[in-house]
Image (spheres, rainbow, N blue to C red):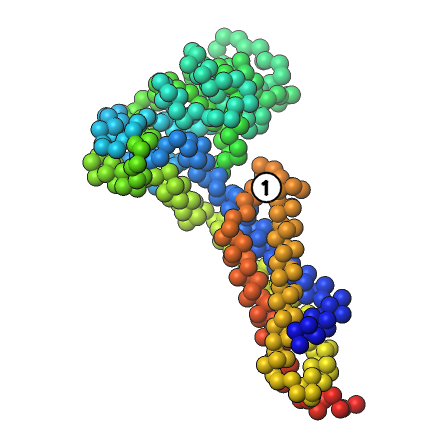
Amino acid sequence: MIRIALRMLLGDTTKFVGVVLGVFFCTFLITHLLSMFTGLMSRTYALVTDIPQADIWVMDPAVEYVDEPAGLPSTSLDRVRSVEGVKWAVPLFSGSLRCRLPSGRFRSVLVIGVDDATLLGAPEHMVEGRVESLRSEDAAIVDLGGARDLLRLPVEAPVRGPGWNMPVLDGPARALEVGDEILVNDRRVVIAGIADLGPRFLSKAILYVPYSRALRMSPPERNLLSFVLVKAAEGEDGRGLAGRIQESTGLRARTAQDFSDDTYEYYFRTTGVVGRIVFMISLGVVVGIAVSALLLFMFTAESAPYYATLKALGASNQRVVAMVLAQAAVCGATGYGLGVGFSCLLGRVIIKSDTMPYLLAGKTLVFTACAVMVVTMFAAVMSAVKVMRLEPAQVFKT
């Protein structure tokens, strides 16, 4: 009977394609929007994932996410190092400072101060220059996006005289290059390298400098230590060590994964993008249900004489309903596969760019599969009710 149901479905190509397209549209919308949302939100904790060597991040107890640290006393570093199970601990500075370009234009830049001795926390993927060049006087490494877009310099340096000079905000500009000089908080910075960090959630240029230089560049404050990065000793459980650090120092200690999750949840709670994504996903589900259910119902209604014939030949309601469910399952599976495939193709090949984030996660596939199941089951139930109400005698009516 299932074979007969599939032949009935595939025999009417137009309606079969219509039902599949309804499920495809629903699947594509949900998968693509969720993948773009996941890709966008993965950028919120990029600073954490950029430093894979650190197992634990130690911070002020009031810090909620990675982009807004509170200063710690310099003694916090030694207190963390004294905790049993800590292999090493290094300081990290993170703060926004104002950068003044030769044209007179200014930008807000994120300055990351890495450990002077080990340079742990410096970017790994260098496009130009070497990480070790940070040890040179006034040297800094800039991210590729900031060098290309946010920190562009005039092609011809404007002529400057004594005193105040009018900013030159128009005219041709070029990307920032190795050897160029800029001012950060009125301090000279020489670009010694360019690193490919990937896109960030907040559009801001990033500068890497040694920790001691970052403290000198920053406005004077009593506490300037943003984070303490910790590596657990061999055999140590990360969460267990974080708990001991927290208990011993009174500071907040989170594993890298937990801190990434904290940052994700903070942006999830506080940004309006979540509500918009949920609305668009809901719209996709409604459209998919409406189109798929309507087309499958129309297909069932036009096939009513065939179902009536089967019932007149002795087929039970359960058997005929099973045929309808099989048809709905085939349409749902086909539309789901096509929708996911097209979403991957569009996100990873056709329009792959920094402005269109795309990250297909396993939970997205599961959620989409559940949504498609709801869509197809709703359509199948509507069609099954129609079939169950058929009278076998209808086959003999003219």
- How many callouts does the rendering have? 1
Horizontal arrangement in the rendering, residue 311 relative to residue 75 (left or right): right
In the image, residue 393 above or below residue 170: below
In the image, residue 374 above or below residue 131: below
Circle 1: residue type = Met
The residue furthest top is 162
| 285, 392: nearer the viewer | 392
| 228, 307: nearer the viewer | 307
Tell me the residue at 22%/28% (across/down).
82
Tell me the residue at 67%/42% (across/down).
350
| Residue 186: image location, x then y, percent | 43, 17
| 165, 363: nearer the viewer | 363
Circle 1 sits on which residue? 356
In the image, residue 4 above or below residue 124: below
Quarter the N terminus occupies: bottom right
Tell me the residue at 61%/83% (across/down).
317
Horizontal arrangement in the rendering, residue 171 relative to residue 373 (left or right): right
In the image, residue 224 above or below residue 368: above
| Residue 225: image location, x then y, percent | 31, 27
Tell me the residue at 27%/38% (across/down).
241
Say few, some or many: other residues with alpha carbon within 10 Å of mark 1 (under 14 / 14 to 19 / 20 or more). Answer: few
Circle 1: element type: loop
| Residue 376: image location, x then y, percent | 59, 67
Q: In which quarter of the image is residue 93?
A: top left
